[in-house]
Image (cartoon, grey):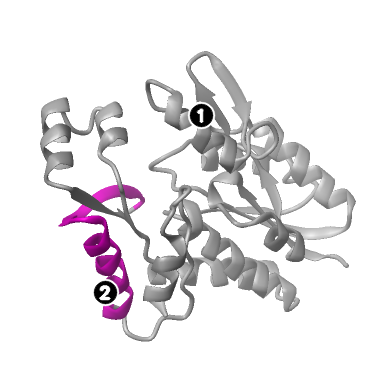
Amino acid sequence: MTGIRIVTDSACDVPDDVLAEHRIGVVPLTIRFGDEDLIDREELSPAEFWQRCETFAGLPETAAPSAGRFEELFRRLASEGAEGIVCVCISAELSATAQSAGIAAQSVADTIPVRVIDSRFVSLGQGLIVLAAAEAAGLGKGLDDVVAAAEDAIPRTRVFATLDTLENLRKGGRIGAAKAMIGSLLSFKPIIAVEDGVVAEAGRQRTRARSLRHLVDKVAEHGEVENVTVVHGQAADLEQFLDMLG
């Protein structure tokens, strides 16, 4: 099977079985804990990531993949018979990943056409755009139509999240220690969103239950929703939240 192939980066949070089903290639970011660099999904699983976060004094950092990693995958897909590649990357406001992919696309231009798309999102917001492209490719659409499917999904995508603790905001310097302490005492749960390619504050709720209800209400506000996906960081109340979503 040839046609158009889809590539993304590991920030998309699309499960491995879904990636395999759609034959989506993934170029991993690097995650840095202090002086230790680990390749996402290759040397560090999501479970291991969260376990390390619990004991690490600071916050982990990410590094974009090299252009060479993208070029290697682009050339391999070309050798497998791909006629074109659509590469959907994490927001360029948050990472240099799309820039690396663009350099690689130029390097292989004489071998295969590659179109790089800035998803303007991260996590499963990015993942939904990846899957929109993959579904179009699976229908046998050409390069321009697959690109159009991904670009059409971008303005229709929304990402909202709630944080159960203010500790990581404190570690990252977004709020001071005193504010974090007061917020924790008052049980404030921040609501965040991805807007214009960056993470922004979208409100706060008192108690975890109210913050989860707020997310459910956000979904309802948008009326008829095509897809709803849930991603979590070791959330103990995941099943409760899924029940609330109905």
In which quadrant of the rendered view does residue 212 lie?
bottom left
Q: Position of residue 153 (x, y in %)?
A: 48, 70
Per the model, the C-alpha gap separating discs 2 and 1 is 33 Å
Residue found at x 56% / y 17%: 36
Q: Which amino acid does label 2 sit on?
A: Asp
Label whose residue precedes the other's in the sequence (2 or 1): 1
Give the magenta range.
Answer: 197-221
Left or right, 50 with reference to 108: left
| SS label for mark 1 | helix
- Residue under circle 2? 217
User: Circles 2 and 1: CB distance less than 8 Å?
Assistant: no
In which quadrant of the rendered view does residue 49 lie?
top right
Is 15 or 70 nearer to us in this picture? 15
Left or right, 183 with reference to 223: left
Is the C terminus in the top left, top right, bottom left or bottom right quadrant?
bottom left
Observer able to see residue 107: no
Please, is residue 71 above or below residue 191 in the view? above
Residue found at x 46% / y 66%: 239
| SS label for mark 2 | helix
- Residue under circle 1? 52
Residue 168 belongs to magenta span: no
